[in-house]
Image: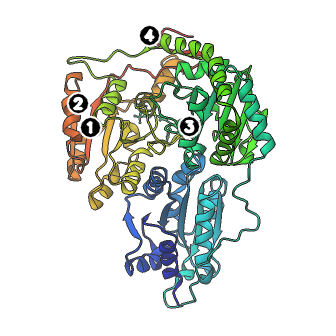
Amino acid sequence: MLSGADMVVRALADEGVEYLFGYPGGAALHIYDALHRQDRVKHILVRHEQGATHMADGYARATGKTGAVLVTSGPGATNTITGIATAYMDSIPMVVLCGQVASHLIGEDAFQETDIIGVTRPIVKHSFTVHHPSEIPGIIRKAFYIASSGRPGPVVIDIPKDMTAIDKTFEYVWPSSVDLRSYQATVRPHGGQVRKAFSALLEARRPVLFAGGGVISGNAGEALTAFARRFDLPVTTSLMGIGAFPGKDRQSLGWPGMHGSVEANTAMHEADLIFCIGARFDDRVTNNVRKFCPDATIVHVDIDPSAISKTVVADIPIVGSASDVLAELSRLADEQKGRALDDYRQALAPWWAHIDDVRQQSTKWRYTPATGDAQPKPQQVVEAVYNITEGKAIVVTDVGQHQMFAAQYYPCERPRQFLTSGGLGTMGYGFPAGIGAKVGCPDQTVVVFTGEGSFQMMMQEFGTCRQYDIPVKIVALNNSFLGMVHQWQGMFYDGRYSESLMQTTPDFDLICRAYGFRAIKVTRADELEAALEDAFRDPNELVMLDIAVEPSEQVYPMQIPGGAMNEMRVSDTEVV
Ligand SMILES: Cc1ncc(C[n+]2csc(CCOP(=O)(O)OP(=O)(O)O)c2C)c(N)n1
């Protein structure tokens, strides 16, 4: 017999939850008391509830497990909104347990009461309210199942305080299976549709394989890579799909879209087949949907039927998981005689010759590294971090120009290596998500690329790093303004830089020292290498690199708004 509070904690442990990221308060105190009585679930006390959700998110993205959060009612719960929305937009599995005022007070505007179920409804995959303590194990089991199955996403559980009262106990029953009448997590892909897609692929002479976050969440990176290699397909990955295919491979064209590579955008625009697996044709990818890939047959594989034909109409829709569909495709490929595959690869030779030509052409728009006492270029910093970490770090970003530079200049080789807020574009995401990733993967180097604007949104989480000894490496590309906003104002508002200059930025060195950490300042290109060596020498030390980067550097390529995929500004003066 257990109290509701003990059931919450026991059920989390039975679910295999290792870490809860959270912050206590009145309505959650019974649960916090129960946490104190056990040692199976470890709790990380954050400094802001938004940080807890981003940590759980980073933990989930880096490990593939579901992130778990515990907060109190009212302001505790509302502080999680941005993190829940971030996870929702990027399909990240997360369960957020929120305390609530006692049942008899609900609807009375009681102290710290918020209808968190109502507030979060548009940004969760599902939500639950606990109506009786004995429901708790079943609800927790279902919540984790829903969060992590099918298209993953966040689930909220609202727990009125009387449900966790410690003086009333009930039988604890951990359900052996999950029974959800109206929820079907996976659908077997339709064999006929997969064959149709396969034939379209065999007929294509200018194909592009386009992989998204669904390949990563579905653990299908290896299958995708093997398939792409067999057919010698050019591969693009969405921002969320970075790492689904090795970024430095000859077949990788990088990522398409607003700041995507010239070769990815050009190849997709000119393709006769876009074979999309687990991406949702976000508007940051397609640019103007009416001009999107005019000659291409669109194959769209997605686990979520509602994602198919939402923006780009699919010629061959396939509902199914990336791994199931890839397994079926490779079975069909096995049936081809070796000769047929050789012929196919041969037939793609002119397409590859063209792509390689575009790739070669685009090198002329590469940045030139700064030298001597000039401020380092942001791209150069990212490349230097790539070199010192031998391309192996888990890379986490905030949002802005630095995010795009990190995605462009730190090619990732494996799934779950590149963590970024793609869908919501949440400034403040990077540092706490990096902390969560480090908690989940303590043996890996975690590098957070941030801007001085983004970092100030969540820098209080230094406290969490201090308390639990979480040594992430922070690389701030400090340009003293809200760079991405500044870039848009320069391009589209005739240089009227309304409120995008950060006229005061704190001395990060002093802030770091206040928390017992070290910051290293870099202002000259010739200091960069030694500073990086110093920062990365001890893997167990949190170090912040505050790098004053060349502020005039813009993110290119940049698609022309309203244009086709291949209409891009490639430098301050050139448009292709
Ligand atoms: C929470 C939030 N507020 C506002 C924005 C809009 N926004 C996008 S990028 C950006 C500037 C980011 O500045 P900084 O973190 O310094 O990075 P930089 O672009 O300079 O690399 C802003 C304000 C956002 N994405 N998220």
Judging by the rendered image, the residue that carries numbered circle 2 is 522
Percent position of residue 456, x then y: 37, 43
Percent position of residue 319, x then y: 74, 46
* Amino acid type of the residue tagged 3 in the rendering: Ala
Judging by the rendered image, the residue that carries numbered circle 3 is 226
* Amino acid type of the residue tagged 4 in the rendering: Lys
Q: Residues within 10 Å of mark 3 (few under 14, many from 20)?
A: some
Q: CA distance from mark 4 to mark 1?
A: 30 Å
Ligand 1 within 8 Å of disc 2? The answer is no
Q: Earlier in the sequence, mark 4 or mark 1?
A: 4
Ligand 1 within 8 Å of disc 4? The answer is no
Q: Earlier in the sequence, mark 1 or mark 3?
A: 3
Residue at 62% over, 77% down: 175
Q: CA distance from mark 4 to mark 3?
A: 32 Å
* Amino acid type of the residue tagged 1 in the rendering: Leu
Judging by the rendered image, the residue that carries numbered circle 1 is 545
Ligand 1 within 8 Å of disc 1? The answer is no
Q: CA distance from mark 3 to mark 2?
A: 42 Å
Percent position of residue 63, x then y: 46, 54
Q: Earlier in the sequence, mark 4 or mark 3?
A: 3
Q: Earlier in the sequence, mark 2 or mark 4?
A: 4
Residue at 41% over, 32% down: 406
Residue 238: name its quadrant: top right
Q: Nearer the viewer, residue 351 or 519?
A: 351
Q: Residues within 10 Å of mark 2 (few under 14, many from 20)?
A: many
Q: Are marks 1 and 2 in contact (CB under 8 Å)?
A: yes
Judging by the rendered image, the residue that carries numbered circle 4 is 364
In this rendering, the answer to whether 528 lies above or below 465 is above
Tag 2 secondary structure? strand
In this rendering, the answer to whether 506 lies above or below 39 is above
Q: Nearer the viewer, mark 4 or mark 3?
A: 3
Q: Residues within 10 Å of mark 1 (few under 14, many from 20)?
A: many
